[in-house]
Amino acid sequence: MLAYYQELLGMPAEELKREYQSVSQAFARDRSELGRLRLALLMCVPGAAWRDDAKLLGMLEGAASRKAPFDSPRLQFIILLQKLVMERQKEQKRADELQQKLDSMLTIERSLRGRRTQKK
């Protein structure tokens, strides 16, 4: 699985898009565990237009490997993916909050500049 992810990271955008469409269609047909994990990895590719953390978490939650013994490599892999996605969501929320604060500060700064200009 990790080799597949490395391969995905090296693909040009168009090839990656075709791979996503192919794997997505295959998973819709057979709902195999391997297809689920491949689709999950495709959804983890940075900058991908089809990235959807909520959908990804739902897919991982529904994985058959979730019922495997705790020391199962597939279960551990799914747990790792879930933790990474949840951490990414937390970081994105933090970045959004910081951007909002920055935007507010810039608005205040523009307002103060406008007042100074009017006083002159």
Image (tube, grey):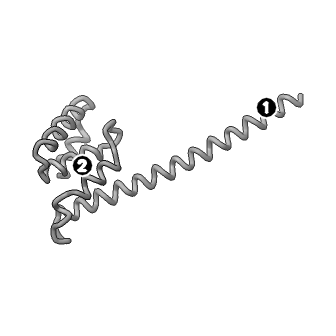
Taking the spot 48% from the left edge, 51% from the top edge, the residue there is 93
Q: Amino acid at mark 2?
A: Ala
Within 10 Å of disc 2 (Cα), the crowding (few <14, some 14-19, many 20+) is: many
Question: Which residue was labeled with disc 2?
Answer: 40
**Residue 114 disc label:** 1
Q: Position of residue 41 (x, y in %)?
A: 24, 48
Within 10 Å of disc 1 (Cα), the crowding (few <14, some 14-19, many 20+) is: few
Q: Amino acid at mark 1?
A: Gly
Q: Position of residue 94 (x, y in %)?
A: 51, 52
Q: Position of residue 116 (x, y in %)?
A: 84, 33
Q: Quadrant of the C terminus?
A: top right
Closer to the camera in the image, 51 or 1: 51
The residue positioned farthest toward the bottom in the image shown: 70
The residue positioned farthest toward the right in the image shown: 120
Asked whether, in this view, residue 59 is left or right of residue 32, the answer is right
Tag 1's secondary structure?
A: helix
Tag 2's secondary structure?
A: helix
Q: Position of residue 71 (x, y in %)?
A: 18, 71
Quadrant hosting residue 107: top right
Taking the spot 20% from the left edge, 63% from the top edge, the residue there is 66
Asked whether, in this view, residue 99 is left or right of residue 15, the answer is right
Closer to the camera in the image, 89 or 8: 89
